[in-house]
Image (spheres, rainbow, N blue to C red):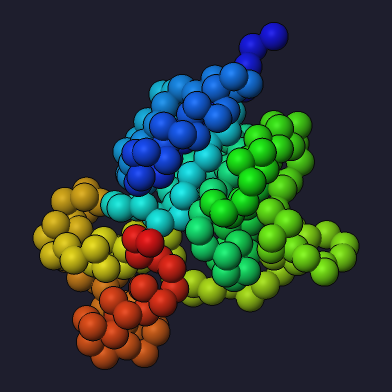
Amino acid sequence: MQRPRIILADDHTLLLDALKNLIEPEFEVVGTFNDGKALVEAVPRLNPNVVVLDIGMPTMNGLNAGQRLKQMMPMLKLVYLTMNHDPDVAGEAFRLGASAFVLKNSAATELLEAIRKVVRGGYYVTPLMTKGMEGSVVQYFKQRKAKYPLTLRQKEVLQLLAEGRSMKEVAFVLNVSARTVAFHKYTMMEHLHIRSNAELIEYALRSSLAVA
């Protein structure tokens, strides 16, 4: 029987190596990536069953990357492995198509359990975030008020600006014109009632959109 194909994405190389060693006896690791953009570009070619990814990554954060991946491959399972224990972030992840949300300070066996569950079509949320909850935990997270009233492209622009890139650099990374980047930037500022670049970057960091 063919083992499920897994891709790992995290900006810490040592962690990627440890994760690969942890899951390879049971699953086939077909790729590892350090940034969201490279992950999104490679997934269709590698055709995994599951992607295990962090939220805070350079170039494109995990939430944006996951949304892109689900648009391209709706059957793909996303397992978020993160230090971020904010319930709003978990809710955003599930609204965008996640099947599991695991904290990095959980036991290593939890990640294996999460992958097994999502491969079978189920969901998993780390017990560290669900103590005292009853009923459908995933529905609880999905129903939390959306934290990011921005489009996917706006979130991508915001992420790159928060990394300190110029509008010209953002345009190059996203393969759009600098004028398009400027349009998205000033539309966001108007929508969020933000008046300066510093306030925009502060919003990105506060919203967990930028690199963790």
Q: Quadrant of the N terminus?
A: top right
Q: Is residue 100 left or right of residue 164?
A: right
* Towards the viewer: 13 or 137: 13
Q: Which quarter of the picture shows residue 122?
A: top right
Q: x, y (%) of residue 2?
A: 64, 12
Residue farthest toward the right in the current orientation of the protein: 135
* Towards the viewer: 157 or 117: 117
Q: Quadrant of the C terminus?
A: bottom left
Q: Is residue 98 left or right of residue 82?
A: right
Q: Is residue 196 left or right of residue 35?
A: left
Q: Which quarter of the picture shows residue 35?
A: top left
Q: x, y (%) of residue 199?
A: 29, 85
Q: x, y (%) of residue 85?
A: 57, 65
Residue pictured at 73% horizontal, 46% vertical: 123
Q: Which quarter of the picture shows residue 185?
A: bottom left
Count of numbered circles in the view: 0
- When the figure is inspected, residue 184 is found, relative to residue 189, above or below; the finding is above
Residue pictured at 16% horizontal, 51% vertical: 172
The answer to whether residue 118 is seen in the rendering is no
The answer to whether residue 123 is seen in the rendering is yes
Residue pictured at 57% horizontal, 28% vertical: 23
- When the figure is inspected, residue 65 is found, relative to residue 75, above or below; the finding is below
- When the figure is inspected, residue 28 is found, relative to residue 110, above or below; the finding is above
Residue farthest toward the top in the current orientation of the protein: 1
Residue pictured at 72% horizontal, 48% vertical: 124
- When the figure is inspected, residue 131 is found, relative to residue 1, above or below; the finding is below
